[in-house]
Image (spheres, rainbow, N blue to C red):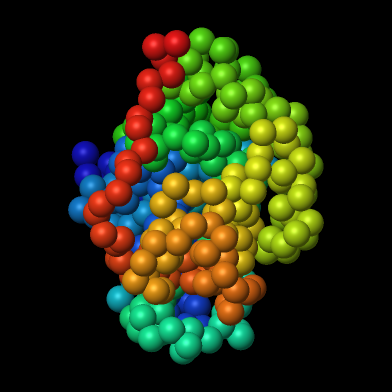
């Protein structure tokens, strides 16, 4: 079986080796993409069961479905292979996916010793730019006002039911995000079965109607006020959802997830040793305006954890209503 998998892997529709000017850390780069254990669109293959150890990602490109495999070599370069009608588009986007357009110039963490030390320990961290705005938005909508556990469970249920079969030798169980038209056709009872309340279901459907225009925001660069305004033009999409989308789709280095249940406290504890609210978080991050999301990513990637006390959000079962 291993031989058969290797043979199929060799028949990639497109491939490249990308050697960035400065070494990156592939795991850090891609850590934002996975939506929990069992995400049908993203998988780490640590044991090399499906080829060289690395990351698998499925995606629906403007040219069709694609499966992407990324493996970091000993010299730091990343070998990328892709299958399917969207393979060439996917390979062309690998440098941006791995932070080629991310410019940390002007970012100086030296005023905060803890942040400076975390940044020093993470020289391979760059901000990914995924593209595919609607897919990133659809996932963010599912995460509105619920626990991460609930959101990831809904994503798995919906992708397993409505996702496309990935091309090439993708690991078993992976699926391709089906796109706006299929997302729009999901029946109300299927949203309910996935644990998605009517408000998030309505927002998801509204987003499908504006999907084409949202994809065009990629031409506006790596985020910014105009991009966020376009994202928030979708009824039901607010500051938090727009920020979560722009962080991944556009690689926005400044988008802060205001309204998150945890982020403000994590930033407060990391930078000052105590909790803060959203306003306090923005005040703390202001010295790094233009790189505020970079600060958040460094803190999260450093492994910092706030003290384990205080109120906990309650998991709700919307399927009971």
Q: Residue at x 35, y 46 (%)?
A: 43
Q: Quadrant of the N terminus?
A: top left
How many dots with numbers? 0
| Rendering quarter of residue 53 | bottom left
State left or right for residue 185 relative to residue 264: right
How far across and how far down the image is residue 5, in percent?
30, 44
State left or right for residue 21 relative to residue 172: right
Q: Residue at x 41, y 74 (%)?
A: 271
Q: Residue at the bottom extreme?
A: 110
How far across and how far down the image is residue 216, in percent?
77, 49
In the foreground, 146 or 103? 146
In the foreground, 8 or 296? 296
How far across and how far down the image is residue 213, in percent?
79, 42
Q: Is residue 186 above or below residue 163?
A: above
Q: Residue at x 49, y 36 (%)?
A: 145
Q: Residue at x 53, y 86 (%)?
A: 108
Q: Is residue 233 above or below residue 153?
A: below
| Rendering quarter of residue 39 | top left
Q: Quadrant of the C terminus?
A: top left
How far across and how far down the image is residue 129, in percent?
58, 60
Q: Answer yes or no: is residue 220 visible.
A: yes
State left or right for residue 111 relative to residue 106: left
Q: Is residue 242 above or below residue 209?
A: below
Q: Answer yes or no: is residue 132 visible.
A: no
């Amino acid at each position: 079986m291993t031989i058969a998998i290797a043979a199929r892997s060799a028949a990639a529709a497109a491939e490249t080796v990308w050697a960035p000017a400065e070494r990156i850390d592939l795991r850090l780069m891609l850590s934002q993409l996975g939506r929990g254990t069992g995400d049908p669109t993203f998988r780490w293959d640590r044991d090399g069961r499906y080829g060289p150890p690395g990351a698998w990602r499925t995606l629906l490109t403007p040219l069709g479905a694609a499966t992407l495999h990324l493996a970091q070599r000993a010299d730091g370069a990343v070998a990328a292979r892709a299958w399917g009608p969207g393979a060439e588009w996917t390979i062309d986007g690998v440098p941006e996916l791995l932070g080629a357009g991310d410019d940390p110039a002007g970012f100086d963490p030296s005023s905060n010793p803890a942040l400076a030390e975390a940044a020093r320990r993470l020289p391979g961290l760059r901000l990914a730019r995924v593209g595919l705005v609607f897919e990133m938005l659809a996932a963010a909508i599912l995460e509105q006002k619920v626990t991460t556990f609930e959101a990831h469970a809904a994503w798995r249920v919906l992708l397993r039911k409505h996702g496309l079969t990935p091309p090439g030798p993708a690991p078993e169980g992976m699926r391709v995000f089906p796109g706006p038209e299929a997302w729009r056709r999901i029946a109300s009872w299927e949203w309910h079965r996935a644990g998605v309340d009517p408000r998030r279901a309505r927002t998801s459907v509204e987003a499908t109607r504006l999907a084409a225009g949202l994809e065009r925001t990629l031409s506006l660069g790596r985020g910014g006020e105009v991009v966020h305004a376009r994202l928030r033009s979708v009824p039901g999409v607010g500051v938090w959802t727009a920020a979560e989308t722009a962080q991944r789709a556009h690689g926005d280095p400044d988008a802060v997830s205001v309204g998150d249940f945890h982020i403000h406290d994590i930033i407060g504890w990391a930078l000052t040793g105590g909790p803060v609210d959203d306003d306090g978080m923005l005040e703390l991050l202001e010295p790094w305006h233009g790189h505020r999301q970079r600060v958040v990513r460094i803190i999260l990637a450093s492994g910092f954890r706030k003290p384990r006390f205080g109120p906990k959000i309650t998991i709700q079962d919307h399927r009971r209503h």
